[in-house]
Amino acid sequence: MDKLIYIRGKDEPTRESSKIEFEFTEDLDIQEFKTICVRLAGALGYSPTTIKKGFGDDCLDDKKDNKNQTKLLFD
């Protein structure tokens, strides 16, 4: 199991997330890793416009049908 951890600077107290942690399997392809990075950017409060500029216009494509995600939600 691999982890990607973001820890916000400890010097300044904040009401926002101080730690964000993603756990994922070691066999991710680059597209799956990109998806995790996009989610991290969103969790850190970056706007959808900024995320699209950094990761490409299709990274937040709501029209994509993720059948595996839908299956997890409704099973």
Image (cartoon, rainbow, N blue to C red):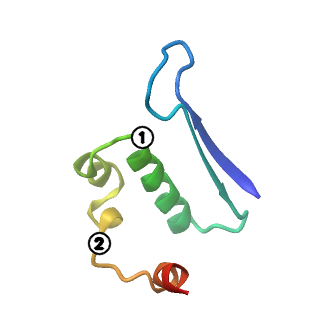
Q: Which mark is residue 44?
A: 1
Task: Give the residue at x 29% y 72%.
Answer: 62
Q: Which image quarter is the C terminus in? A: bottom right
Mark 2 and mark 1 residues within 8 Å of each other at the beta carbon: no
* Along the viewing direction, whichever of 75 and 65 lies nearer the viewer: 75
Neighbour tally class for label 2: few under 14, some 14-19, many 20 plus, Cα within 10 Å: few
Residue found farthest to the right: 1
Q: Which amino acid type is marked by label 2?
A: Asp
Task: Tell me where residue 69 appears, x and y as whole percent.
Answer: 49, 78
Residue found farthest to the top: 11
Q: Is residue 38 above or below residue 69?
A: above
What's the distance in space between the residues labelled 2 and 1, CA to CA?
A: 20 Å
Q: Counting residues from the N terminus, which is met first, the one under dot 2 or under dot 1?
A: 1
* Along the viewing direction, whichever of 39 and 27 lies nearer the viewer: 39
- Residue identifier under label 2: 62
Task: Tell me where residue 43 appears, x and y as whole percent.
Answer: 43, 46
Q: Is residue 23 above or below residue 18?
A: below
Q: Which mark is residue 4?
A: none
Task: Tell me where residue 46 appears, x and y as whole percent.
Answer: 33, 42
Task: Tell me where residue 1 appears, x and y as whole percent.
Answer: 77, 58
User: Label 1's element?
Assistant: loop
Q: Which amino acid type is marked by label 1?
A: Leu
